[in-house]
Amino acid sequence: MIYNQYGKTGARVSAVGFGGMRFDTSIPNEGNAELLPYAFSKGINYFDTAPGYCDDKSEDIFGIALKQMANIRDEFYVTSKGMPADFDTADKARKAVEKSLKRLNVDKLDFYHVWCIRDIEQYHLAMKKGGQYEGLVKCRDEGLIDNIVVSTHLPGDKVSVLLEKSDFEGVLLGVNILNFLYRWEGVQAACDAGLGVVAMNPLSGGIIPKHEEKLAFLAGASETPTEAALRFNISCPQITVTLLGITTTGHIDTACRIADNCRPFTQADIDRVKANVSENMDSICTGCGYCTPHCDQHIPVADYMQCYNEKLLAGKTDKEMLEVMTFNHEWGLLADAEATAKECTQCGKCQEACTQHLNITERLEHLAKWEKTAGIG
């Protein structure tokens, strides 16, 4: 395993991080909890979770595992998160930290994220007098957390705004082999500021493993596109931790094998990727699902966006998209949909919640037209 210094904190963290967002919630929490000590045995010492992950089971799963790992607590790092809108006062922020500590069965959090900054207004909300950040500073002073960090989905050129006052020790942001051309400015700004840089969505929310044939250009000799994507992030000197959503021991084994045998991308590798990556790649929905709960019409928005990915990834024609929609309504993502795209009222709530700032309502219009032509709904 490769280990990197996390900014100026003194923490020596594994280049592969355990992301607690992809547990298999169909099995008992105890079964999922077994993944954490297994990951640690392979060299992973950075464990990231948040309230709400995996139907709000992730922190509890972590808690089962971390209680079992209590005798080696000083050998790994634990993170959690809180959104400014949910914890908009210092008191609420403290209670959120205390709740996470209790669920995780730890006495302190090594890193705590001001979570999911999608626009500058949310940053200002977190930083207001008597707000979340003030509460986190008090928690840090009392030893409940060690480092205050930030998670953001701002475009690369705006990430520097969060760094101007040196409020944070590190930044968690989405960057991968498909979108790095459009996100790299944020990575470089954080690195230049001497902060830890944690990269989420290294596999573009699972898009890369699902579409390996279409994305074959990513891979070098003797590797799959998925392996190439992990190698790209893990080998980047500007990235401290590559955060991988873990579902199986196989995911851990693959990532650790790549880290153990990591060779950086050459300029020829990067040129090959650049020649094939289009701007569409920065517009692919990563399936985080934050949009769907905001739809008053009960449209499975995230599932529809996964269907639209077919248009972006493969450049499918309108005729081909009719086949995509028919298949997904009969057998795929939309088979159990409560509502169809035509029922969108364009209220914009899903779009406001989108971490990638995608034009969801416009996409739903296109999807509704394909459904209508295909005789769906």
Image: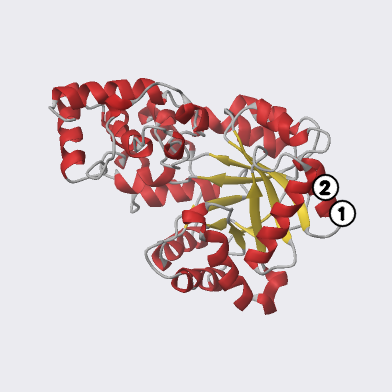
Give left or right: position of 80 versus 256: right
Query: Image point 65% across, 30% down: which residue?
Result: 159
Task: Name the residue carrying label 2.
Answer: 137
Task: Name the residue carrying label 1.
Answer: 141
Residue 161 screen position, x and y as percent: 71, 27
The quadrant of the picture occupied by the N terminus is bottom right
Give left or right: position of 23 versus 165: left
- Looking at the picture, which amino acid does disc 1 mark? Asp
Outermost left residue: 375
Tell me the CA gap for discs 1 and 2.
6 Å
Residue 359 visible in the shown view: yes
Do the CB atoms of the residues marked 1 and 2 lie less than 8 Å apart? yes
Question: Under tag 2, what secondary structure?
Answer: helix
Which residue occupies the foreground of this view, 337 or 26? 337
Give left or right: position of 47 versus 254: right
Q: Residue 49 lies in what quarter of the image?
A: bottom right
Residue 53 screen position, x and y as percent: 51, 53
Query: Image point 53% across, 70% down: which residue?
Result: 42
